[in-house]
Image (cartoon, rainbow, N blue to C red):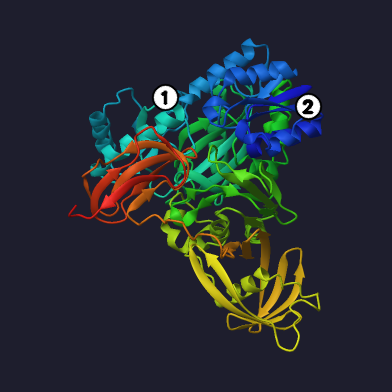
Amino acid sequence: MFQRVLIANRGEIACRVMATCRRLGVDTVAVHSDADAGAKHVAMADAAVRIGLAPAAESYLNGERIIAAALETGAEAIHPGYGFLSENPDFVERVAAAGLVFIGPSAAAIRAMGLKDAAKALMAEAGVPVVPGYHGAEQDPGYLAEQAALIGYPVLIKAVAGGGGKGMRRVGHPRDFAAALASARREAQGAFGNEAMLVEKYVTAPRHIEIQVFGDGFGDAVHLFERDCSLQRRHQKVIEEAPAPGMTPVMREAMGEAAVRAAQAIGYSGAGTVEFIVDGSRALHPDGFWFMEMNTRLQVEHPVTEAITGVDLVEWQLRVAAGEPLPLRQEALAISGHAFEARLYAEDPARDFLPAIGTLTHLAFPPGVRVDAGIRAGDAISPWYDPMIAKLIVHGPTRATALGALARALEASRVAGSVTNLGFLARLARQADFVAGRVDTGLIERNIDALTPPAARDAGLLAVAAIAAEGLEACADPLAGFALWAPLRRQVVLEAEGERQTVALEVRGPGRFLAAGQEVAVDRCEGGELACRIDGVARRFGLARAGRSLTIFEGAEAHGLRRPDPLAGAGEVQGSGDEIRAPMPGLVRHLAVETGAQVAAGDVLVVLEAMKMEHALTAPRDGTVAEVAVAAGQQVTEGTVMIRLGSQDD
């Protein structure tokens, strides 16, 4: 076994790898950018090395600096995590040339699966079923459009390099093909440095089922069963589970054997995932699945496989990379129970899952849940990297018990300081089709309105917020709210999403109030959790404070409010509705209009690249482009005016 390993990554995956290393007595070395100097993974490691500036291209993608850091600190091996350099064969070769061990597959195996078109041809030769489509070298837009017509709509445009939903577009009609292709190419070029595309038939009611494989690099490989990753938004996974609902022994054997053939065909070493698209319009059947791609690394969702098999996949990675044989043979592997993983992100589901930034002023999870996180309370969500906050993983004897545990864990989690998808996840965990196991990749899109309802702050919640804003929620204090001669009465001003509301508050005794017209009794206040009766109805709330800001939690919903500073804002100038501003820091990837252009509501004006995704900003109304205030390739900060609209008559 290695004595010291460098983890060439950040965030939750770096912390996850370090946890196993620590258990095995292996020292760890962290690398970090300037933005991550105080990050959790840096604090966890036995040693840490700065490798560059905040942009990933100047730090986490700097392979030479990472190798130098490993040599400087006496590391024997490099674990790449996932993302960044984990699937870069040139980096693997440079690691080996430096006399270090790369904890993962060979450069040849990564190259074999790195380009989707070549990988599909290789898999077809190995007898693995592949999706019908065009995987050739010709990249002329007109030719690709012709191939799409021959395949038949709907089709899926996919980048031949990379993954994670980037450079992927579903096209339902020929008129939309050219624009979708251009957008996918820009995103793929920015993410992978390769704009080549393939076009495939879009499978009706598709399910995304993947098989975890593990190889020893000498032709032996096993599979550790399947994961269902069908719950997706923007082609990115949201909640994963293992095993897959509706899976039959015959189907599992067929998919497992196909995945092992895929791994053996390239002499695979270490952990990998073979991803399949599955026909979800009928019961699972061995003739209804097709190879999509192979991820030649550990996956974000690997904990659900660990939960049902009892295997530590990172330990297996370390042992195989150190020259040991596979720890278990296929016949020794078995499934126990059911597991789910939910990905908690700083993003706004109501705004098409727009990534968010902010400092997490409060972060707490319930006991009994595995939480993989690379961020702590007080840490900032950086605009430079993926906005994941944590992964919540639960395991139970049955699917129903595990899913119930996931829903309760999400509803008991507390995050303040940034908008998150926590409420969305909790609603999704109780969505009827998902509960019944009727899943496919379109489930979220079909139910998006029900899963992203507008924020609702009723009178009861405002009453509790006013009480908490005055610091009167401590019901055990008999002097809280005490006043001589007459009840204490106040007008409490609260602000939420730019709107102010005044709440009338009257203290009627210890833990008893009249607020927002509601009779409120605070029966218990402990550890930021309040048990209340509002007009006789029992309700439970959570509470977190940060300066003048206040977050009230009810279930998985977080309601951010603020007590406005009466001395602030006197000279502030607010932007008009005619200004299209950057919702976050990012790179202006594409300008779709120029000054003087006539636009209609919904037309794309500018494409901003931020947090590893493209975000199309559209016109809020009909009008004329009065000014284009930015240039393509320009880096902008949050709030930067990019486009100004005039009237249609301008």
Residue 628 x/y as whole percent: 30, 42
Which is nearer the N-term, disc 1 or disc 2? 2
The front one of 309 and 422 is: 422
Estimate the x, y position of residue 486 in percent, counting from the top left.
71, 88
Q: Is residue 328 above or below residue 109?
A: below
Horizontal side of 441 relative to 10 (left or right) equals left
Which residue is drawn at the image coordinates 77% and 29% (left, top)? 46
* Whether label 1 touches label 2, CB < 8 Å: no
Mark 1 sits on what residue? 121
**Label 1 vs label 2, nearer the camera:** 2
- Would you place residue 640 above or below residue 555 in this image? above
Quadrant in which the N terminus is drawn: top right
- Mark 1: which secondary structure? helix
Q: Position of residue 229 (x, y in %)?
A: 53, 45
Quarter of the figure with residue 16: top right
Distance Cα–Cα, label 1 vs label 2: 41 Å
Q: Secondary structure at mark 2?
A: strand
The label on residue 473 is none
Left or right of 290, for residue 540: right
Check residue 27 in the rendering and tell me which mark sits there, or answer none: 2
Left or right: 538 in relation to 4: left
For disc 1, the neighbor class at 10 Å (few under 14, some 14 to 19, many from 20) is some
Which of the two residues, 208 or 635, is positioned nearer the viewer here?
635
Horizontal side, residue 247 vs residue 135: left or right: right
The residue closer to the viewer here, 303 or 589, is 589
Three-letter code for the amino acid on which mark 1 is drawn = Ala
Q: Residue at x 52, y 72 (%)?
A: 501
Which amino acid does the dot numbered 2 rest on? Asp
Please determine whether, in this image, residue 533 is positioned above or below residue 128.
below
* Residue at x-position 38% and y-position 32%: 633
